[in-house]
Image (cartoon, rainbow, N blue to C red):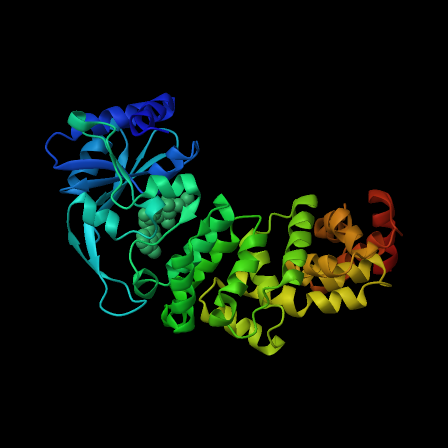
Amino acid sequence: MRADAVIAELRALQSLRPVLDAVTALSGPYEGVYLVGGTVRDLLLGERGFDVDIAVEGDAIAFAESLALALGGRVRTHRTFGTAAVFYGDGGRVDVVTARTESYHAPAVLPSVEHAGIHDDLFRRDFTINAMAVSLRPDDLGQLVDPFGGRADLEARRLRVLHPRSFVDDPTRIFRAVRYENRLGFRMDDETLRLAHDSVGTGHVGDLSRARLREELIALFGEGHVDHTIVRIHELGLDEAVHPHLAADAETVELLRRLTALDDEYELGVPSWRLGFAVLARRLPPEEVLDWLRSLKLRRRDAELIAAAVTVGPRLAASLGEADPAEVVALADPFAPDAPLFALALADLEPLRDYFGRLRGVRLEVTGRDLAGLGVAESPRVGEILAELRRRKLNGELAGRDEELAAARELIG
Ligand code: ATP
């Protein structure tokens, strides 16, 4: 697509028209106002649902405030970083940053930043395909700024870093490269691949903060189909750099595919990154799984569910073949849905299919209030009776409210 066609394309997106018109109208006092980064990449690729990222040569916060006013929206500012987000209409969002340059003082540590022009701003970015800008000022509207050959790389479906120290400065870019490879079907060129290997080999991934590592892993495995990602992190040695016992092999690919398919089939809504963490972590010594997940500062509930999938899942797969429905529920429910799902992906057992297809939704029709009506005082006995009723119902011994009440009377008696 030609650069001027980019603007035509943008304007054709009716929902963005008012935003672009407002941005252009407000841009007069600023040195430069540009559409940047992934927005330009996705537009050139003909994508539709993308974020709008704008870089301003000048005060991005003042610009964002005027934009919010013009759109009748609101603005959230981060003054320390010189960035702002404008929220408008029904879920619309525009991110505005001050064009800046970054200097890295140590490998893998966040850089210090200074205001700069658009060329410097593009130079701080990860790959050439993300280092293009399109002017939104009226005098050169639609002009493409492409100092590093990003457009040619887009056409060649190639990921290329902007300079040889890129992965040393910021090893999260290696994870980003794998994510783009997987999502777009692009590939790193030979030099970029070599630099990635060098950076991993030199141990820079280990220097990343746990929080940044966690965010990259979540982004990597949050993308749905990640067959290529798994193969690639192993080829690059990223798996071992993250933890010596991570499993990223053909079996991991297969297991994750099964987990994803089952998660969809039973509409469980387990986030795909959590499934990814479980398959990766499944060969860690069981007593280390939770510690590792906690070291990444995952939310406690997420860490526990993943750890249960890895440690309890195989036990469920081995023990539920002959269990009756009530036993299946008793064993699976405390770790649901991740651990029984993991078990089902390991062994396609009928009791587990029954658990997700039916048993999980079985509810009693009688309640504690009914038991009170039958004269049972509020006490642990209420819970015990309800549990026994549910056990019988799960095993098909009770059908309907009347039978449940009759069984309750018998138990009370
Ligand atoms: P997507 O959100 O679709 O994954 P994106 O390109 O919008 O893609 P973001 O993570 O939102 O990705 O980042 C926005 C832009 O910021 C990128 O296009 C890239 O130019 C730049 N960027 C993000 N992270 C880095 C990084 N670690 N190093 C250098 N540049 C980065």
Q: Residue at x 53, y 55 (%)?
A: 229
Q: Where is residue 353 in the image (x, y as percent from the top left)?
A: 78, 52
Image quadrant in which the C terminus is located: bottom right
Viewer-proximal residue among 386 and 169: 169
Where 318 falls versus 376 (above or below)?
below
Where 22 falls versus 209 (above or below)?
above
Image quadrant in which the N terminus is located: top left
Q: Position of residue 232 (x, y in %)?
A: 52, 59
Location of residue 51 by image quarter: top left
Q: Where is residue 133 in the image (x, y as percent from the top left)?
A: 27, 38
- Residue 309 visible within the image: yes
Q: Position of residue 39 (x, y in %)?
A: 35, 38
Q: Residue farthest to the front?
A: 190
Q: Residue at x 40, y 37 (%)?
A: 42
Viewer-proximal residue among 324 and 227: 227
Viewer-proximal residue among 157 and 88: 157
Viewer-proximal residue among 176 and 194: 194
Q: Which residue is drawn at 56% across and 61% down?
A: 277
In the picture provided, is 37 more to the left or to the right than 355? left
In the picture provided, is 248 more to the left or to the right than 211? right
Q: Which residue is drawn at 51% across and 62% down?
A: 233
Where 32 falls versus 403 (above or below)?
above
In the picture provided, is 275 more to the left or to the right than 60? right
- Residue 366 visible within the image: no
Q: What is the tally of numbered marks visible in this picture?
A: 0
Q: Residue farthest to the left?
A: 29
Location of residue 173 by image quarter: bottom left
